[in-house]
Image (cartoon, rainbow, N blue to C red):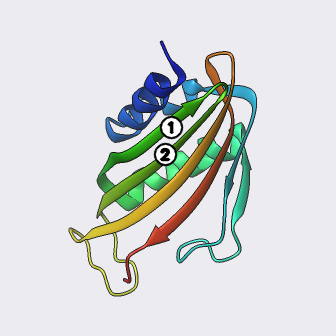
Amino acid sequence: MSRADLVRAYLKAIEDRGDSLAFFADDAVQEEFPNALVPTGARRTLADLRAASARGQGVLTSETYEIVNLVEAGDLVACEVLWRGVLAVPIRSLKPGDVMKARFGVFFEFAGDKIRRQRNYDCFEPF
């Protein structure tokens, strides 16, 4: 399976609320650069991602990841993603059932068939 296919499968696992963390290496690090939801950004280990995933399950009833562009070069995959999340809880001006939207620039670095680094540049539509 190509690394691009692994990224597609990873995003699908998130949508399906499957085991998306199985795609990560044990020493993986995910960085989320400052955005409207996380103004100071975040750096997460695999354990942090596990905790964040559990919290996220209560915030959204569903989410989708539409890949707009994807480039694979060796151990690196870069994608532009249109994300939509249906809210289970109110967030600022949005109420449960509303759709939050964002465009993500996501960069994945692989070690073999596992994600070792993920960097997110998330741009949310106003809410």
Question: What residue would you read off at disc 2?
Answer: 79
Residue at point 20%, 68% (across, down): 97
Please provide percent x and percent y for residue 119. Answer: 65, 50
Residue 49's disc is none
Q: Residue at x 59, y 55 (%)?
A: 120
Outermost residue on the bottom side: it is 93
Q: Amino acid at mark 1?
A: Val
Q: Position of residue 89 (x, y in %)?
A: 34, 70
Image quarter hosting the C terminus: bottom left
Q: Amino acid at mark 2?
A: Cys
Q: Nearer the viewer, residue 109 or 16?
A: 109
- Residue positioned most to the left: 97
Total marks in image: 2
> Is 64 above or below relative to 112?
below
Q: Nearer the viewer, residue 69 or 15?
A: 69
Q: Which residue was labeled with disc 1?
A: 71
- In the image, residue 112 sits, relative to residue 13, either above or below, namely above
Q: Residue at 64% of width from left, 77% of height from top?
A: 39
CA–CA distance in space, label 1 to label 2:
6 Å
Report x, y in % for residue 1.
Answer: 48, 12
Q: Are marks 1 and 2 in contact (CB under 8 Å)?
A: yes
Q: State the SS at label 2.
A: strand
